[in-house]
Amino acid sequence: MGSGRGTARTVGMRVVHPRIGLVLHPKGGALAKMLPAFRAGVGGKLGNGKHYWSWIALPDMIEAIGFLLEKPDAFGAVNMGGPNPVTNEQFTKALGSALHRPTFFTAPRFALRLMVGEMADEALFASIRMAPKRLQEAGFAFKHPELKEAFESLFDHAAA
């Protein structure tokens, strides 16, 4: 059955459960997969664009993890998304603006479902509007709280 040992929490260890939003960096993850279409000027919103995406810039994510490691009173579920979630439409416009490209295209929901199946609903159309309340209450300050500024910073650093 068991090894006789308890879970981390039952043996007195502090446990933090990060709930991670869309982590943004131009060299990896979802943003890197979006960039070719947006750079080519054919990026656009998904479906009606009204679903929320909670996002966090990778540098803030790294800082938040370090911050939580140093906070002995931090435990349990902690939302690790930026303080200003946006709709897919807002995300699309901000990305297009940062890249100086148009964003008038729309990828219809039915077409994305045909291409990737049910994963479209779970990965692309799930609306998640989480706030990093516990992280901010613990004293964490985001360097990139606004999406437009986060994109500008990420693309400036990626070019360097």
Image (cartoon, helix red, strand yellow):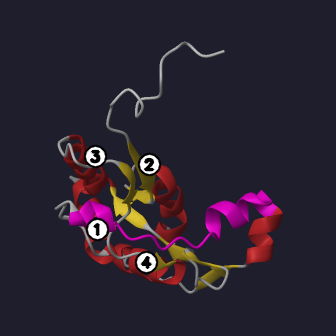
Q: In this rendering, is residue 87 above or below 64?
A: below
Q: Which residue is mark 1?
A: 150
Whether the magenta-drawn stretch holds residue 97 is answered as no
Asked if the residue at tag 1 contacts the one at tag 2, i.e. Cβ–Cβ closer than 8 Å, the answer is: no
Quadrant of the image for the N terminus? Answer: top right
Question: From this viewpoint, which residue is outermost toward the right?
Answer: 114
- Nearest the eye: 55 or 4: 4
Q: Which residue is mark 4?
A: 96
Magenta range: 115-137
Q: Which residue is mark 2?
A: 28
**Among the two numbered marks 3 and 4 on one chain, the one whose residue lies closer to the N terminus:** 3
**Among the two numbered marks 2 and 1 on one chain, the one whose residue lies closer to the N terminus:** 2
Task: Tell me how far mark 2 sits from mark 3, CA to CA.
Answer: 18 Å
Q: Residue 144 placed where, x, y %?
A: 24, 67
Q: Residue 115 placed where, x, y %?
A: 78, 61
For label 2, the SS is loop
